[in-house]
Amino acid sequence: MRELQLTNAAAGIADVFEDIEALAASCRFTDCLHETEPGCTILAAIADGSLDPARFNRWRKLQAEDAFNSASLAERREKNRAFGKLVRSAVKVKLDRKR
Ligand SMILES: [Zn+2]
């Protein structure tokens, strides 16, 4: 359920900021932070007035939050997996003792 929400959040961001997503996607630097990189598509759009810098800042904030949420989700998954392993090995020990 939570995963669904997160996916929707990412999709929602892409929806509302479609133009910025498009600019970011067409930026020639794949790992661009769109901050100081010369030749950055987003910075160029802000410079020529076609992109509102406040809107861009909002998008970047949401991106960061989304990345943070996704990261903690991955972390939780990892913990669950570790716990599952622990349970399985505990069960195995129990079964071994019975023999
Ligand atoms: Zn850029």
Image (cartoon, rainbow, N blue to C red):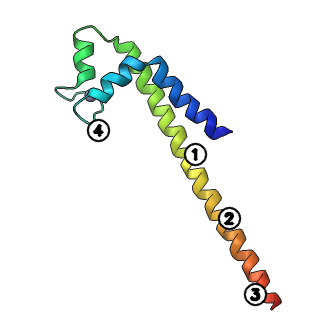
| Disc 1 to disc 2, C-alpha distance | 16 Å
Between marks 3 and 2, how big is the CA–CA gap? 18 Å
Q: Nearer the viewer, mark 3 or mark 1?
A: 3
Of pointers 3 and 4, the one earlier in the residue sequence: 4
Q: Secondary structure at mark 3?
A: helix
Mark 1 = which residue? 73
Q: Amino acid at mark 3?
A: Asp
Judged left or right of residue 96, residue 37 is left
Q: Earlier in the sequence, mark 3 or mark 1?
A: 1
Front residue (pair 87, 36): 87
The C terminus, quarter of image: bottom right
> Residue 45's x, y, as percent?
26, 15
Q: Pointer 2 and pointer 4: residues touching (CB < 8 Å)?
A: no
Sequence order check: which comes first, mark 2 or mark 4?
4
Q: Is residue 45 above or below residue 86?
A: above
Residue extending furthest toward the right: 98
Q: Which residue is mark 2?
A: 84
* In the image: residue 75, left or right of residue 96: left
Numbered label attached to residue 31 = 4
What is the distance, in whole Å, between disc 3 and disc 4 at their CAs? 51 Å
Which numbered tag is attached to residue 96? 3
Separation (CA) of disc 2 from disc 4: 35 Å
Give the structural element (helix, strand or loop) at label 2: helix
Q: Residues within 10 Å of mark 2 (few under 14, many from 20)?
A: few
Q: x%, y% of residue 80?
A: 65, 57
